[in-house]
Amino acid sequence: MSIDTTQANRESGHFAEHQELWLFGYGSLIYKAGFDYLRRAPATITGWQRRFWQGSHDHRGTPDAPGRVATLVEAPGQVCLGMAYRITPAVFDHLDHREKNGYLRFVTPMRFADGDIEDGLVYIATPDNAAWLGDASVDAIAGQIQRSTGPSGPNRDYLLQLDKALRELGADDTHVAAIAARLRERMAAEPGV
Ligand code: BEZ
């Protein structure tokens, strides 16, 4: 299941006149950018939480056996810690293509550790996109991630790298930590899977 969001993102025009802008990363962008940036710094956004509810048919899974990757869902009052990147608009050509499977750009206020607040762009997969998987038990999500692999590598690497990076940042993300812990238990019980 796939819907190409590249064109919708190109037409959104956010920050079209800007020479530099902020991008907020909450998934793989926390541990790996894959593009040039001017600087980066941890930042938080409010009203959103990270969830492994988006299917990945093109990076960490396949059309027949999708993996699960992070998106953000609305959660009033919740604070989500991520990594902000200062970038040029050219980076969006790269990201619009890389994240074309359901992710749309939104604008959000971001708060930095020193209290500064800046607007940033964030890619979010919403429940109406074709690759949406939604909620499932911690064990079911961990099992799907354990079994899935795609052109960007094993789904488990994405989860475990994100969990490690979040802990190094001091984030208290119980959703990611619980799935990662369950995945480790499953891997220990079934080393060949
Ligand atoms: C991220 O924050 O890692 C991310 C970037 C683009 C799409 C989805 C997530």
Image (tube, rainbow, N blue to C red):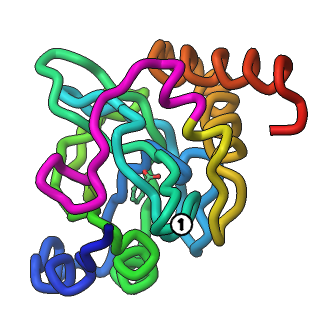
- Image x and y of residue 139, in percent: 53, 19
Question: Which amino acid is tagged 1?
Answer: Thr
* Residue under label 1: 62
| Residue for point 65% across, 71% down | 151
Foreground residue among 147 and 77: 147
Q: In this picture, which residue range is highlighted in magenta?
A: 125-143
Q: Residue furthest front?
A: 64
x and y, in percent, of residue 18 in the image: 22, 78
- Identified at 28% across, 62% down, the residue is 103
- Looking at the rendered image, the quarter that the C terminus falls into is top right
Residue 135 is a magenta residue: yes
Q: Secondary structure at mark 1?
A: loop
Question: Magenta span has 136?
Answer: yes
In the image, residue 2 lies at what x, y percent?
31, 72
- x and y percentages locating residue 72 in the rendered image: 28, 39
Question: How many numbered marks have been drawn onto this rendered protein structure?
Answer: 1
Residue 107 occupies which quadrant of the picture?
A: bottom left
Q: As rendered, which of 59 and 165 lies closer to the eye?
A: 59
Q: Residue 177 sits in which quadrant?
A: top right
Quadrant of the drawing holding the N terminus: bottom left
Main SS of the magenta segment? Answer: loop
